[in-house]
Image: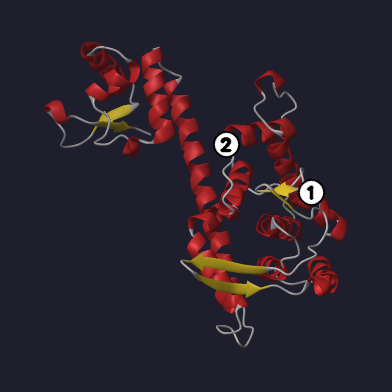
Amino acid sequence: DASINEILESSEIEGEVLSRDSVRSSVRKKLDENFDYESDSSTRHTDGLVSLLLDSRQNDTLLTEERLHAWHSILFPTGYSDGHKIDVATYRSDEMSVVSNKGYSETVHYLAPPHEQLREAMNKFLDYVNNSQENPFVKSAIAHIWFISIHPYDDGNGRIDRTITNYVLSKELGLDHKYYSLSTAIRKDRKAYYDVLEKSQNLFYNRDFDFTKWIAWHTTMINLAIESSLEQIKIIIQKTKFWDKAREHPLNERQLKVLNKLLNKGVENFEGGLSTKKYANMVSTSIPTAKRDITGLIDYGLIEQVEGSAGRNTRYVMRF
């Protein structure tokens, strides 16, 4: 799920919403030898994004201009972005600035280097990525802000940038599989991301070119991503243990359906908690049948009554 989330969230940061089923199908097609092609819901685009992510994580060969261009062509296989023709698999040939519009006023947040300087700037950047012995977390943060400051492509710079961050962390830490998604953490705090990025790049705010705040923020995002991943792993282990216990009992289809919904959505997502009436509605059964099912689940030790609830207000929660 970390790989799926990385692809989904990195695209969403840029305003592109992908189908989770399509991305999941593309991931499974790459990693599962027994993939069922009859149920394939992937697209050429999501297949490409998965190939890009896996290359950044599992291919630790040098990062080169050709490799970056290949990644860029994966993002824009048609040569168009939002209906506009762009330069693909080559550095931009025009000037680049990051602007926002409010009413009739336009604010320039950042002006990238002139296109005539791109090759020299990128050569220095690639030399740093390939040869620097910096701490991996510091190096990934510096590589992130360095590349996005050069802004070498017509479009897709943010997604390529986060791919480079994945590459640096995977290579420097010796991990061909990362069980956390940095893009998820960044997307959750997207406003802060653009704010700290602008204040680090803009000489009005950062006249000494001190990137300490950026490195600290970037490292915090990595830490949050890891913590979130550990929490997800904890939940998966908890679910596995729960089903190991549940398999010891003769559950009917209704009980299995309700337990699945509770595990997948969480009891907190059922406003007011799980009640007999809600149980009956979830599986389209009668109240008496729902009561018998619930009594059975309590006897099996799979759910329990919420302390203090009684009568029509009786509520139930999972018992792990």
Q: Residue at x 29, y 22 (%)?
A: 279
x, y (%) of residue 139? Answer: 70, 69
x, y (%) of residue 145? Answer: 66, 69
Label 2 element class: helix
Picture quadrant where residue 38 is located: top right
Image vertical order of residue 98 relative to residue 166, above or below: below
Asked whether residue 176 is in view, the answer is no
In front here: 24 or 45?
45
Q: Mark 2 — residue? A: 20
Residue at the far left in the pictured view = 311
Picture quadrant where residue 163 is located: bottom right
Q: Mark 1 — residue? A: 73
Q: Residue at x 81, y 70 (%)?
A: 118
Label 1 element class: helix
In front here: 253 or 15?
15
Q: Which label's residue is closer to the chain start, 1 or 2?
A: 2
- The amino acid sitting under disc 2 is Arg
Q: Which quadrant of the figure contains the N terminus?
A: top right
Q: Which quadrant of the figure contains the C terminus?
A: top left
Looking at the rendered image, the disc whose residue lies closer to the viewer, 1 or 2, is 1
